Amino acid sequence: MTTLKRNVNHSIPLLQNKRSVLGSLTNRPLNQINTLKQKNVHQEINNCKVLKKQKQPNLGTIQLKQSKERIRKRGKISQQTKTTKKRFRNNQKSKSNPKKEKKKFQQRKKSKKDQKVKKAKTKSHPIDPKEISKITDIHRPFSKLPEHVTEIADEITQNMRIKEKQDHIGEDFLQKQSQVNANMREILVDWLCDVHINFEFKTETLYLTAKLLDKFLLLKPVPTNRLQLVGITALLIASKYQEVNTPDIEEFVLVANGAFTLKELLKMEILMLTVLRFRVTYVSPYFFLQIYLKAAGIELISEEFHKLKFLSNYFLELTLLKSYFRKFCPSKLAASSLYLAIKTLNLNSNSNFNSIGNKNALHKSGQNSKCWSNTLTHYTKFHTEQIIDCVILISTLSNQLLNFGQSEENQTPNIKKKYSDPDFYSVAMMKIPLIKKN
């Protein structure tokens, strides 16, 4: 048997010589990796040096600005301390001289009085200060009720006067409307008055419907075929807000005689509320009229008071028809309607007894006597000269309605039909005087 001997020359090289044999495979990529790492490190070092050079001047400027601001603040504080020290010294000197203190106190009082006088002049209160003592408290007989307490009632009226200015629409609220006209709006409001009477709603709901309608027309354009739908939705929202028992929504659809469906009405209700931002509370002129009637000074049980109440309500509801009455605020509309009602009934403000105990009560007299008492000017905050423009417009409109016939072209409005009923003392059939500026 022949034995094979391993040759030492053909053996595998040792580990020390592996790199020399496999140098082409291992040593070259390792060298490349090391060189790349060294290059990246050098780049990072250079970038850091550049950033340090850029940041150093910015930090210095910021520190300088901060130091300057601190110095300025210290200077201001030092000036304030100096002024306070001077005041303290002057006060100590004045304490030693009581005569100087009295003079300064009197000067302060005079300055405060002058400021009050300037404010009063700017307000231009119509009542003389001597006659303010004659004014009576109209809320005293109703003081048991919480809303008629003098302090609370005055605050409520002041708040309402502020809100009426905020929610004022103006005469030009139909400018955005390309299809809707003032005459079309008048026809719609007259029809809504008829629906209001049939449903037997409160008077507050009618004023609220008109306000919601005008506010919606101000904010969004409406086509002619959707105007009736907008009006009935305004009445629906107002009835939900004011009335205790509202009718079903289907009844509102039946009133229109198939002009729109129930789904369309519900969609319009959502749209109106979103456009108005769910703001439904507005100041109505009817609120102010209820207060002004108490200030008129007539016995609340008498026929004269009922006639005055219905006549002033008639004039006030007529203002809802025409769009040009929107330029006046609700408080002025209420005051002007009451003034015209007092003129038509020939009432004046001479001394006479009434239920409230007011010496400036109203009773029948000639045309030359005064018809606007000091109590009315106090509670209405209007003088006759401030109201006369609105009164003239209401008187002309009411006289035009007296001449209206029963023909198809020139139909009488539903408001006149309502107040020509004997239950309302047929107030709409009375002769109304034409008022002119002096």
Image (cartoon, helix red, strand yellow):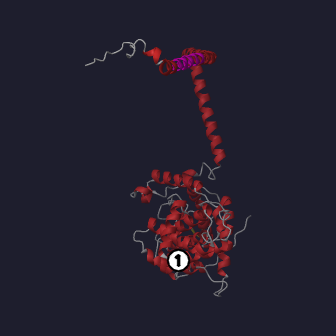
Amino acid at pointer 1: Phe
- The relative height of residue 194 versus residue 30 in the rendered view (above or below) is below
User: In x, y percent, where is residue 279?
Assistant: 51, 58
Q: Which one is in front, 283 or 153?
A: 283
- Single out the residue that lies furthest toward the front: 1
Residue at 48% across, 77% down = 253
- Figure label count: 1
Q: Can the viewer see residue 338?
A: yes
- Specify whether residue 37 is painted magenta: yes
- The relative height of residue 62 versus residue 286 in the rendered view (above or below) is above
User: In x, y percent, where is residue 21?
Assistant: 46, 17
Name the quadrant of the C terminus. bottom right
Q: Give the structural element (helix, strand or loop) at label 1.
A: loop
Q: Which one is in front, 211 or 313?
A: 211
When asked about the image quadrant of residue 229, the answer is bottom right
Magenta region, main secondary structure: helix
- Single out the residue that lies furthest toward the left: 1
Left or right: residue 226 compared with residue 172 = left
When asked about the image quadrant of residue 393, the answer is bottom right
Residue at 65% across, 80% down = 402
Q: Which one is in front, 396 or 185?
A: 185
Badge 1 crowding class, 10 Å Cα cut-off, few under 14, some 14 to 19, many 20 or more, is some
The residue stretch that appears in magenta: 31-46
User: In x, y percent, where is residue 371?
Assistant: 62, 65
Q: Which residue is mark 1?
A: 260
